[in-house]
Image (spheres, rainbow, N blue to C red):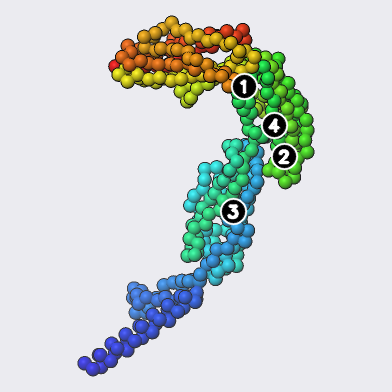
Amino acid sequence: MIRILVIAVIALGLGATIGTLQAKWKRRGVVEQFQVASTAAGSGQAQPVQDRVVGIPKLELPDGDTFRFGQMLHGSSMSHDFLVRNSGDGPLTLEQIGSTCKCTVGKLSNNVLKPGEETKVTLTWRAQVVAPVFGQSATFKTNDTQQPELRLQIEGSGIDSFVFEPSSVDLGDFMTSQGATRQFMVYSYSDPDVELSQTQWTDSNSVSHIQLSHQPMEIDPTSPHAKAHRAYRLNLSVGPGMPLGPLSTKIRFVTNHGEQIEVPELEVNGRVVSEISIVGGTAFNAQRNMLDMGTVSAKQGASIHLYLVVRGDDREGFEVTAEQAEANESLKVQVAEPKIFDDRTMIPIHFEVPKGAPEVYYPGTGAGTFVPVLIRTSSSKLPELPIRVRVVVRP
């Protein structure tokens, strides 16, 4: 009995010692040889099973995990090689687990790196959109416990062959008697031999009032457009006499290559007003001359005030009347006493749905679905101003 106990104690001590040594060897990254006490058929000898390498890999990116390419043309492609190195003392494995839809990963030159080895990971991407911030990425799984996931990414901007600053021209409200002027820049990222040869105003109704000119400019090497091949300053002059109302058109640029390359266009927006105009709050759409009174309860009623603004010499003795041919009981339109200021006269126009008004349905969904109101003035320059009113009166 004592002999059995002694053997058991010795076995326990030996097992603990072996466990401690194995843990130390694992931390030091050595090679362990494992054997299991299995017996081959017809043999009473233990069989060796495997050698296991337990060195520790370490992922290193000498050039970083982000490549900033600056600018690239819309529709073009680029590639970049990321360098990945194993600076540990165990093998490093790389396995791609995902990438963004516009970024592809070339075949890895090596997806298992021995200690001290390095490989290239090639990312290729295509700029399918024009955007000031453009980024793509690819993700990999590694066996480095300190970096179990590697994310390689590219950053920059996708630009068109021609870039405008500003990206569109907003003339705002300008009087037909005064016109307007604007200057802006055009940058060409197309082939170096492409030059702007002509500018065209696309609105045939107002082209007789337009003057366009452009001149080459030196490119500032410190500007965001330092990589452009050419730069131009364009001058736009809108002369007096423009037709009243909203302006929405484009300037087309013709190059010395004609239609062989894309024809860039710049949007131009604004509104031509006269010395006489109507202003109001958010319920009034000045470009469409539309007043939206919405849905009104006949029990409560509603009212909105617009102002007819008169500038220039015509404001002396200016007269205004309002006429309407429909919904006279449900919508009352009245002109109030003018308010005179140093540079303008403002004449209030009141639109009211009185309490107890009969039901009407003018939803403003198309022609004939508005209440037409005509503002008549004593000015020969603008004798009539039509206003369309959207209003629905419920009980």
Question: Which one is earlier in the sequence, the residue at label 3 or at label 4?
Answer: 3
- Mark 1 or 4: the one toward you: 1
| x 58%, y 56%: residue | 65
Question: Which one is earlier in the sequence, the residue at label 1 or at label 4?
Answer: 4
Question: Which one is earlier in the sequence, the residue at label 3 or at label 2?
Answer: 3
Percent position (x, y) of residue 268?
A: 63, 25
Distance CA(mark 3)–CA(mark 2)? 24 Å
Say what secondary structure mark 1 lies in: loop
Question: Which one is earlier in the sequence, the residue at label 4 or at label 2?
Answer: 4
Q: Where is the N terminus found, in terms of image quarters? A: bottom left
At label 1, counting other C-alpha atoms closer than 10 Å, the crowd grade (few under 14, some 14-19, many 20 or more) is few
- Mark 3 or 2: the one toward you: 2
Distance CA(mark 1)–CA(mark 2)? 47 Å
Give the labeled residue for mark 3: 66
| x 60%, y 58%: residue | 64
Distance CA(mark 3)–CA(mark 4)? 34 Å
Distance CA(mark 1)–CA(mark 3)? 59 Å
- Mark 1 or 2: the one toward you: 1
Depth order, front residue of 337/358 = 337
Residue type, numbered disc 3 = Thr
Q: Pick out the residue farthest to the top.
A: 325
Residue type, numbered disc 1 = Asp
Distance CA(mark 1)–CA(mark 4)? 31 Å
Give the labeled residue for mark 2: 228
At label 2, counting other C-alpha atoms closer than 10 Å, the crowd grade (few under 14, some 14-19, many 20 or more) is many
Say what secondary structure mark 4 lies in: strand
Percent position (x, y) of residue 226?
A: 72, 43
Label placed on residue 184: 4
Say what secondary structure mark 2 lies in: loop
- Mark 1 or 3: the one toward you: 1
Give the labeled residue for mark 1: 343
